[in-house]
Amino acid sequence: MRAPTALAIVCLAAACSSEGQGRPADAADSATEELPVRRLEGTPEGNLTDWVADMKAGLDTVVTVAARDRAGAQRAVLDAYVNRQEWLERYYGRYGSLQEDTTSALGDAVMDAEARFHDLLTLVSAETVDTAQLTGAVAAVNAELDRVLEEAGRTEVPPVPAREGTE
């Protein structure tokens, strides 16, 4: 009875091991060719550059709005984050559906923008809003978004898939 149990534990450990989980390169390449990336349900209109422009426009007034309407500033940041940054990450982040290279500079820039958004969300959600810190956090997000555009310009960025029936 102990031998089958030990064998089951070894097999389970091997299955859960992080080593060897990836497919060989040729299998990964052929899988990419066979299965085209589909547009995810709920994807906003536009593309990477449109989404970055939307985020920057949404963050443009956060500092002044926060001075009189903290909840309104929170909504503006959350809207930019959920409705654009998250989509940017889903398509172009390190493990995004349009990223072939999980170590790409574009993927890193998208993930760094994500981290700066988290910092901004923390600040704008604080009991009291420090205008100087908030100004710095918005500037940090914008700097990372500029980096996203810069890295996207250096590589051939695949477009977001078209809606079905509009190709």
Image (cartoon, rainbow, N blue to C red):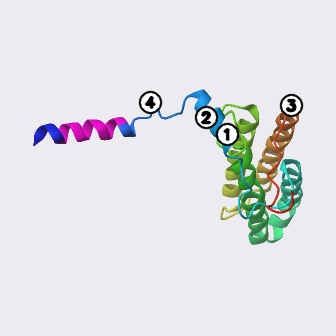
Q: Residues within 10 Å of mark 4 (few under 14, many from 20)?
A: few
Q: Residue at x 10, y 43 (%)?
A: 1
Separation of marks 2 and 3 at Cα, in angstroms: 24 Å
Q: Is residue 50 magenta?
A: no
Of badges 4 and 1, the one in the foreground is 1
24 vs 45: above or below: above
Separation of marks 4 and 1 at Cα, in angstroms: 22 Å
Which image quarter: residue 104?
top right
Horizontal side of 153 relative to 30 (left or right) equals: right
Q: Residue at x 48, y 35 (%)?
A: 21
Q: Which comes before the other along the chain, label 4 or label 1?
A: 4
Of badges 3 and 4, the one in the foreground is 4
Residue 94 appearing in the image: no
47 vs 67: above or below: above
Separation of marks 3 and 1 at Cα, in angstroms: 22 Å
User: Tag on residue 32?
Assistant: 1
Secondary structure of residue under mark 1: helix
Q: Residues within 10 Å of mark 2 (few under 14, many from 20)?
A: few
Residue, disc 2:
28
Horizontal side of 94 relative to 72 (left or right) equals: left
Residue, disc 3:
154
Secondary structure of residue under mark 3: helix
| Magenta stretch bounds | 5-14
Of residues 95 and 127, the one nearer the viewer is 95
Residue 147 appearing in the image: yes
Q: Residue at x 87, y 62 (%)?
A: 64
Tell whether label 2 touches label 4 (CB within 8 Å).
Answer: no
Tell whether label 2 touches label 1 (CB within 8 Å).
Answer: yes
